[in-house]
Image: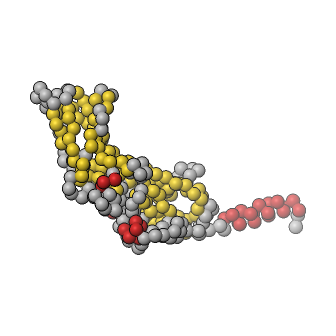
Amino acid sequence: MSFARLPLLSLALCSLCVGSVRAEPTEIVVRVMSKDAKFVGTAMGGAQIVLKDAESGEILAQGLTAGGTGSTPKIMTTPHTGRDPLSDADAAKFSTTLDLQRPRKITVTATGPMNPKQAAMTVSSTQWVVPGKPVNGGDGWVLELRGFAVSLIDEVPREIKLSGGAKMVPLKAKVTMMCGCPTEPGGIWDANKIQVAAIVERSGKAAPAVPLSYAGQQNIFAGQIELKDAGDYVVDIYAYDPANGNTGVERVTLRAQ
């Protein structure tokens, strides 16, 4: 054999080795947990999940979490260590299987809840995934979604007639955790510990916040704001937990004339 042909032979063998590398199915399970609450799933329209290659930006998989919120005792009241799984078979998730030939740095982005849409927040996380090494143990890949789902349940007129004087405008808002878990006085998600109020802004100037009180029905808070002058108003109804800074907002615009 001619020694001049050895480099070509070596190159051919290397090409054969590279070509023989097979993609390995690698399952990734993604769950989204509401801050201080449970999993975000079907009841709230799910959370939109997107998996991307963190280096190229290529979308590898996407879809919605689906399933239940999980066991309240297991998640909220039963003592557990940091490695104890909190999910059960019904707990909402998004599952996909990627065919990987080499380790890839993957970014998962979750946006939700999808209902009500204005409550949706976005969170992301990045990690390496190795072919044939699934990310599905325990609760899988968990992202925490901060906030409250705040939504007006009685339509507020977008145009208010002042009729020569101030006008009191009633507000009634629904406030739940991002998983849809209920707020009520003395409950696991205690309405007495959540500050709910409305901030009214006109011409770039905001008035002091007006509290909304628990209205005697699970998740419902009510109050009223006073509009004195004609003009365009921005009203932000917020829920805030001073224990951890968790915050959600519903924003509406009004015109008084």
Position of 243 compared to 218: left or right? right
Q: Residue at x 42, y 48 (%)?
A: 245
Quadrant of res 68? bottom left
The answer to whether residue 157 is seen in the rendering is yes
Q: Residue at x 21, y 38 (%)?
A: 225
Quadrant holding the C terminus: top left
The relative height of residue 243 versus residue 132 in the rendered view (above or below) is: above
Quadrant holding the N terminus: bottom right
Residue reaching furthest bottom?
Answer: 89
The relative height of residue 240 versus residue 187 in the rendered view (above or below) is: above
Quadrant of res 161? top left
Q: Residue at x 59, y 59 (%)?
A: 128
Q: Position of residue 78 (x, y in %)?
A: 42, 70
Nearer to me, 25 or 158:
158
Nearer to me, 31 or 63:
31
Q: Position of residue 30 (x, y in %)?
A: 47, 62
Quadrant of res 129? bottom right
Nearer to me, 232 or 42:
232
The answer to whether residue 27 is seen in the rendering is no
Q: Position of residue 200 (x, y in %)?
A: 28, 35
Q: Residue at x 18, y 42 (%)?
A: 170
Q: Position of residue 93 (x, y in %)?
A: 42, 65
Nearer to me, 185 or 135:
185
**Colour scheme:** secondary structure
The relative height of residue 33 versus residue 57 in the rendered view (above or below) is: below
